[in-house]
Each structure stands twice: as C-alpha cells, then as structure tokens.
C-alpha cells in the first residue's frame, strides 16, 4: 500500500535554531517528492520538488534531501524564524502515467517556533 | 495577478442544505482538484478534473458533486448526503497530470461549518 509517514507529528523549537523534519514513503513506482508549507488556515505552498535522480535541493533556508534507495526524505530548516511556524507536508507522486489521484500526502509536521 | 482563488473563506450551513464552494484559476491549467482536510489527517482527494467537461471521483467522493464547464472554474457542491461535511476544503490546479507537470498549486481554502 502506498503510504507517506512524517515525523515528528509536532515540534517546538526556539527562534534561530535549526531543525529537521522526516518523511518516509512506500510509494511505487516513484515519480517525485515535494515538500509544502501550510500556514494555519491557508492553502499549502510548494517549497521544493525532487525527482529520483536528485538528492538535495535548497530554497533559501530550506534544504530538502532525498534518498531513493531507503525511500526517505528530510527537510532541514536553518536559523528558524517565527514565520516558519506552520505545517510541513510531504507529498509523493506515483508514476502511473496520466492518471491523477496518484499523489500521496503525509499528515504533516506541525512546527512551532518560539521567541 | 495569476493564481487560484476560492470563495467564500468561511461558510456556515444548516444541516440538510446543499452548499457550493467556488474555485477559479487563471493559470491556464488543465487539471483541477478538490481536497478535504481534517485536523490531524492528510489531504484527501474528493474529485479531480483533467480537462473541461470531464471529472473523476477521488477517494471520498460520496456526498459531493462537481462540474467543469469552463477551464477556469471547478465548483464543488457539498450535498445533504455528506454525513460529516464540517472541514477545510482546498482547491488546487496543475498544468497537467504527468511527471513534473503534476505540481499542484493550492487556493487559500474554504472553511465549512455545519450548524
């Protein structure tokens, strides 16, 4: 069964600290993996997208890694800011070719950055 | 200003009433989607449409209906048959449905509360 598991479920850190969020998946055949940021009461916004051949991608203070062999991804946030407080969702796309309904969403990690 | 819009942001409905949520995009995307988000759960696909005048059921279509008469618009009707309609509803669109073209852009969401 295609699944995406994220950990931790929630995380509290102090402003300025770094943190790493985890995503493990069992999706096959794999197409790509995305990380989204979702502020409370808003729609998700894409942070990064990685295909099978990419093992790291950065977007400002956000760095995502992908290990396609172990089917694991991580999102590292550097020098956290209060505005990083949000839910971070890992989404894996299965490569069924043309059929939609092939995106598998994780439940998200809720990050709170405290001053 | 390109993007995807949803209205209204908040919606209240009495039990037994149908209600329609609006979703409009000016990104010239072919594919559009409706998701439901409940606390502590990942996004769940309700319906999706790959092209005008065509749509497919997602994982939780019961109690919902959609139409796709125009490329820009994909309204969702929550019917009285939906047993637990109180949730946050997200609309998304993508250029296509295969590979890198299935990156989805989300609207700001509509929070529906049934009284």
Image: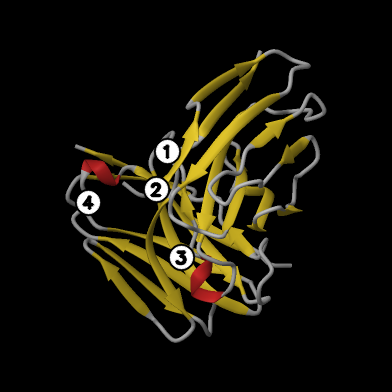
Q: Is residue B39 visible?
A: no
Q: Where B110 falls versus A86 (above or below)?
A: above
Q: CA distance from mark 3 to mark 4?
A: 20 Å
At 79% from the left edge and 24% from the top edge, which residue is drawn? B80
**Can you tell which of label 2 and label 1 is closer to the viewer?**
2
The secondary element bearing badge 2 is classed as loop
Position of the N terminus of chain A, as image quadrant, is: bottom right
Q: Decide which of tag 1 and tag 3 comes sooner along the chain.
A: 3
Q: Residues within 10 Å of mark 2 (few under 14, many from 20)?
A: few
Q: Nearer the viewer, residue A99 or A113?
A: A99
Position of the C terminus of chain A, as image quadrant, is: top left
Q: Nearer the viewer, residue A64 or B66?
A: B66
Q: CA distance from mark 4 to mark 1?
A: 20 Å
Q: Where B34 falls versus B39 (above or below)?
A: below
Q: Position of residue A55 (x, y in %)?
A: 39, 81
Q: Position of residue B7 (x, y in %)?
A: 50, 30
What chain does mark 3 sit on?
Answer: A
Query: What residue is shown with label 4?
Result: A80
Query: What residue is shown with label 2?
Result: B3
Query: What residue is shown with label 1?
Result: A42
**Can you tell which of label 3 and label 4 is closer to the viewer?**
3
The secondary element bearing badge 4 is classed as loop
Question: In the drawing, what numbered circle is on residue A34?
Answer: 3
Give the quadrant of residue B5. top left
What chain does mark 1 sit on?
Answer: A
């Amino acid at each position: 069964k295609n699944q995406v598991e994220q950990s931790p479920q929630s995380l509290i850190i102090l402003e300025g600290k770094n943190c790493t969020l985890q995503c493990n998946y069992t999706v096959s055949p794999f197409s790509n993996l995305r990380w989204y940021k979702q502020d409370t009461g808003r729609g998700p916004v894409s942070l990064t997208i990685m295909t099978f051949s990419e093992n790291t991608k950065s977007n400002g203070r956000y760095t995502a890694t992908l290990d396609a062999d172990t089917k694991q991804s991580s999102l590292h946030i550097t020098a956290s800011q209060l505005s990083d407080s949000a839910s971070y969702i890992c989404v894996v796309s299965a490569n069924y070719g043309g059929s939609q309904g092939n995106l598998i969403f994780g439940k998200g990690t809720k990050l709170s950055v405290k001053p | 200003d390109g993007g995807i819009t949803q209205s209204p942001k908040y919606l209240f409905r009495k039990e037994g009433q149908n209600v329609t949520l609006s979703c409009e995009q000016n990104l010239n995307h072919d594919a559009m989607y409706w998701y439901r988000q409940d606390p502590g759960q990942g996004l769940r696909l309700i319906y999706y449409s790959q092209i005008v005048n065509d749509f497919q059921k997602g994982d939780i279509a019961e109690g919902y209906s959609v139409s796709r008469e125009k490329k820009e618009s994909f309204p969702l009707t929550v019917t009285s048959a939906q047993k637990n309609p109180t949730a946050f509803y997200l609309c998304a669109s993508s250029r296509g449905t295969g590979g890198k073209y299935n990156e989805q852009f989300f609207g700001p969401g509509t929070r529906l509360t049934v009284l």
